Image (tube, grey):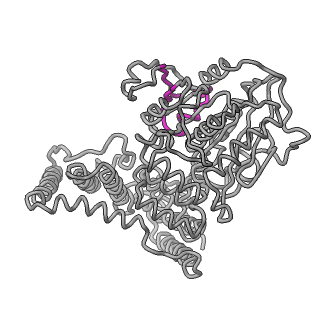
Amino acid sequence: MSTATTDKPKSETKFDAEAFAMNVAQAMESGGKALAAYLKPRESGEVQDRPPAELAEVVKTFTSVAEYWLSDSSRSSDLQTRLAKDYLDLWGSAVRRMTGQDAAPAITPSPRDKRFADPEWKSNQFFDFVMQLYLLTTKWAQELVRDAEGLDPHTRRKAEFYVQQVTNALSPSNFVLTNPEVLRETVASSGENLARGLKMLAEDIAAGKGMLKIRQSNPDNLVVGVNMATTPGKVIYQNEMMQLIQYSPTTEKVLRTPLLIVPPWINKFYILDLKPEKSYIKWCVDQGITVFVISWVNPDKRLGNKSWEDYMKEGPLKAMDVIEKVTGEMKVHTAGYCVGGTMLATTLAWLAEKRRQRVSSATFFAAQVDFTHAGDLLVFVDEEQIAALEQDMKAAGVLEGSKMAMAFNMLRSNDLIWSYVVSNYLKGQQPSAFDLLHWNSDATRMTASNHSYYLRNCYLENRLSTGTMVLDNTLLDLSKVKVPVYNLATREDHIAPAESVLYGSQFFGGPVKYVLSGSGHIAGVVNPPALNKYQYWTNDNVKDVNIAEWMKGAVEHKGSWWPDWREWLGGLDPEEVPARAVGNDALPPIEDAPGSYVRVRA
C-alpha cells in the first residue's frame, strides 16, 4: 500500500482525515511486519529469549539504593516530602500561568539538552508542564542515588547509569502525544510520518535479525571502498586475524622508517580513512610516510578461541615481519588507537622482555595502559557482569557486534539511541548520509577469549601498568619500554579519559610527550589541519600530576595536532629514501585497499 500524500507544501497542508486513516492503516500494517520480524527468529529457535544477566544487575543495584532509604522511616518520609514539594511548586506555577500571571518555572532544561529545544516546550502550557514534571522527577531520581550513603563507588556509578537509562527512555520527547514537533508533523502530514516511521522500524528489526538495529545513517549512500576508505593501496599479506595494507606513495621521497598503524578491532580501521579530506592515513602518505595498516578480521565462532596473545603474534608482530620483507627495515614507527593502543603497549612490553628492537617510536591515540581512571565503560565491569558475559560468549564463541555497539550507544543514549528513535520512527525521517555515524554503526564481533582477557586483565585487574600481566608466558613490564612515546588524549573523551591517559604516561620507561586535543574520542583524533578546528595543548611535565595541574602549565595551540606529531616524528628519524613500491616479488599485492576483511558485516 503506498503512502498517502498531498501536493500542497507542508506549511499549507491541512489535516486530511481520509489520508490520516490510510496512513494509520499502513502504520499498523508495518507494525505487524515489525512484530513478525521480531518473532520469526524466535519461532525458528535462532534467537532464544531469556532474562538478560544485566537485569539481575539492575535489580541488585537498585535494591542497594532502596535499602538505604527504606531502612529508616524518617528517610523514607523525607524522600516523599522532597518530591511532593517539587510537584506542588510546579502545580502552583502552572496555575498562575493559566490565570495569566507571570510565573517562574520550577525547573528548566539544560541549554545543551536538544530534546527540549523546540519553542513550544516553553510556549505551550501543556508541554511546558509535562517537561517540568519529567525534569523534576528525573532530578529526584538522581538525588536518590547521589544522597544514598554506604554505597561503594562502583555500585553508585552503576546506579547513576541505570537511572540515566530509565529516565532517558521515559522522556516525553520520546512519545507521539507528548512531543510537540512530532504532533505538528503528524497533523501536517496526516500521519504520513508514522507510516514511514513504522516501515523503517520493521526494516530495522528485520536487519537486526529479530533485534532492533537502529539506523544512524543512510546505508544506501555510503559504501566502503567506493566513497569511504578510498586511499589507494594494496593488501600485501593476510592471515586468519588480519589483512595488512600498504598504501601507495604520493611523494618522491619518504621517511626511511615506515609507520605501522594498529587500529582497534572494536569497529573498523577506516575511521582513519573516512573521506580523503578527513583521512589521517592519506595525510600521512602525503607527508612522505610509508604507511601500513592492520585491517582486523570480523571473527566468527570458528575463531572464538583466538586470544590476546594470538592477536599480538598474528597482528602487529607478524606485520613487523612482513614490513621488513617489503622495505628491508627491521624497525618501524608504530601508532595504536584505543584498544589497538593497549595491544601495541603489550606488544612493546613483550618485545622489551625478549630484547627485540623492532620499534623506533610509539604513538597512542586515546589509548589506556592503566585503568585506574578508566572511563564510562567501567560501569559494565565487575566480576558478576564479566562472568555473565563470558557465559553468553561461550556458546557463540564471539561477542556479537550489536551488543558491543549497544553498550557504547548507551553511554550517550539520548544522542545515539533516543534521538534516532524520535527522528526515524516518530518523525519518519531517513537519516542523512553521515560518514562518522555510518562507521559507528558498522560493528564488529570480538572473539570470546580475547575479549575476556581484555576485560579481566585491563579493566578489572589493571595488570598491565602494575607489571603483573602475563602474555605468552612472559611477565610484562612497561618500564622496560624505552622507545619515545607520543601519547595523545582528548579533552572530552568518555571512553579513554584525559586523566587516565595522562596517568598512564608515567609507566613507560622512555621519553613521553603527552598531548591533549580538543573534542572527544573520535573528533579529537580525526582532526585534519585543513579544517582548522579545535586546538591542542602541550606540557612536558607528565610525572605526578593530574589533568587539572597539567592544564595549568600547558600551552594551547590552535588547530590540529597532526603537524605537531609529524614534526615530532621527523625529529626522531629524519632520514629519507626514494618512495617505495607497494609489495614486492615475494609479497605481491593480493587485492586493492581497503581489502575484503573490512567489508564483512557483523
Residue 243 pos. (x, y %)? 74, 48
Residue 522 pos. (x, y %)? 54, 39
Q: Is residue 472 left or right of residue 240?
A: left
Rendered residue at 75%/18% (across/down):
575
Residue 189 pos. (x, y %)? 48, 61
Residue 219 pos. (x, y %)? 64, 55
Q: Picture quarter containing residue 375?
A: top left
From this viewpoint, which residue is outermost toward the bottom? 43
* Above or below: residue 367 compared with residue 167: above
Q: Nearer the viewer, residue 280 or 19?
A: 280
Rendered residue at 50%/29% (across/down):
517
Q: In the rendered structure, which segment of residues is drawn in magenta?
A: 514-540
Q: Quadrant of the C terminus?
A: bottom right
User: How many callouts does the rendering have?
Assistant: 0
Rendered residue at 36%/63% (across/down):
57
* Above or below: residue 560 compared with residue 246: above
Q: Is residue 283 visible?
A: no
| Magenta region includes residue 527 | yes
| Magenta region includes residue 539 | yes
Q: Quadrant of the N terminus?
A: bottom right
Q: Is residue 182 visible?
A: yes
